[in-house]
Amino acid sequence: MKMSFKFPVVFETANTPRAASLWVQRYQTFGHTGWKDPVIYAYDQVERLALVRSVLPSGLPGRVALDFGCGTGDFSSLLLTHGYTVHGYDPYVEPRIRSPGFSYAKALEEVHLSENGADVVLSITTLDHILSSPELKRVLCALHNYLKSNGVLVMLEYALDSEGDRLKWGLSKNDYQAFRTVSDWTYLLNGAGLSLASVSAAPHPTANPSQGYVAYSHSRLIRTWRKLPRRLTSRKWLQLVLRQHAKQFIPEIPGSTSLDGTSPLKLICCQRRP
């Protein structure tokens, strides 16, 4: 049975004209909605993929995933390579994925996925952009309903250890990001029928970089890149060179950090409760 929704599940609060314009402009300018700095983005995206890959349940025939906030489709492609049939949702960006195992929806109510039909729901730095807690809870309830009884929600989101971390990490609330605490997330997830299975600090390239990022950023190629004029570094083929270079520095244990093991970014895994 396809799910029907009686509430607005597109980013009601974060979907202000300014927020929508921010993501559309970011995509049009950089070809993605991540870091503006291509050096940071190239490594960070590769490291995030490795981190998620390390906790992703193996895809078996018939396994289904929802990529919530799929963006340009890097994580949808990861899910596809793991054998999942993938439903991608993003209100701003449609991935250029041409695969019979992938479908895209601009609105969550347009996702062709039945209730209790997903083995995995993946959300990469997306849910924290829903600023209203009641709105976020309704979305989390929808994700809960999509999951099978043994389904897993995997999130990579800003989740602070305490309110004081906003000052510690130099974070401030804005009109498109909430910067919730782990306690906030726990309360909201529990209210949506989702139980925390694990919470671990994830590397953040400016707040708490991994050892791999430190080595990458000091490599000869990156030091040379920093000296090149913008008109050269903006070329797409050079972005691909950066990504390939970044892969050489990903730690054997994805997410290992070089500082004290704390980070404003967390990898959170949740189990669906009945």
Image: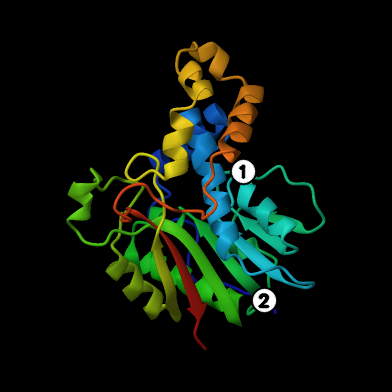
Q: Which residue is mark 1?
A: 72
The x, y position of residue 3, in whole percent, is 63, 74
Q: Does dot 2 land on a helix, a strand or a loop?
A: loop
In the figure, 208 relative to 119: above or below?
Answer: above
Q: Amino acid at mark 1?
A: Thr
* C-alpha separation, residue under disc 1 versus residue under disc 2: 24 Å
Q: Residue at x 22, y 54 (%)?
A: 165
Relative to 183, is 90 on the left or the right? right
Please tell me how crowded label 2 is: few (under 14), some (14-19), or many (20+) other residues with Cα within 10 Å.
many
Q: Residue at x 53, y 55 (%)?
A: 51
In the figure, 236 relative to 93: above or below?
Answer: above
On-image quarter of the N terminus: bottom right
Closer to us: 217 or 127? 217
For the question of whether residue 20 can be seen, the reply is no
Please tell me how crowded label 1 is: few (under 14), some (14-19), or many (20+) other residues with Cα within 10 Å.
many
In the figure, 12 relative to 167: above or below?
Answer: below
The x, y position of residue 4, in whole percent, is 60, 73
Residue reaching furthest to the bottom: 274
Relative to 101, is 130 on the left or the right? left
The x, y position of residue 95, in whole percent, is 66, 45
Disc 1 and disc 2 in contact, CB within 8 angstroms: no
Q: Residue at x 64, y 30 (%)?
A: 240
Q: How is the image coloured?
A: rainbow
Q: Amino acid at mark 2?
A: Gly
Q: Which residue is mark 2?
A: 117
Closer to us: 174 or 32? 32
Q: Earlier in the sequence, mark 1 or mark 2?
A: 1
Q: Does dot 1 land on a helix, a strand or a loop?
A: loop
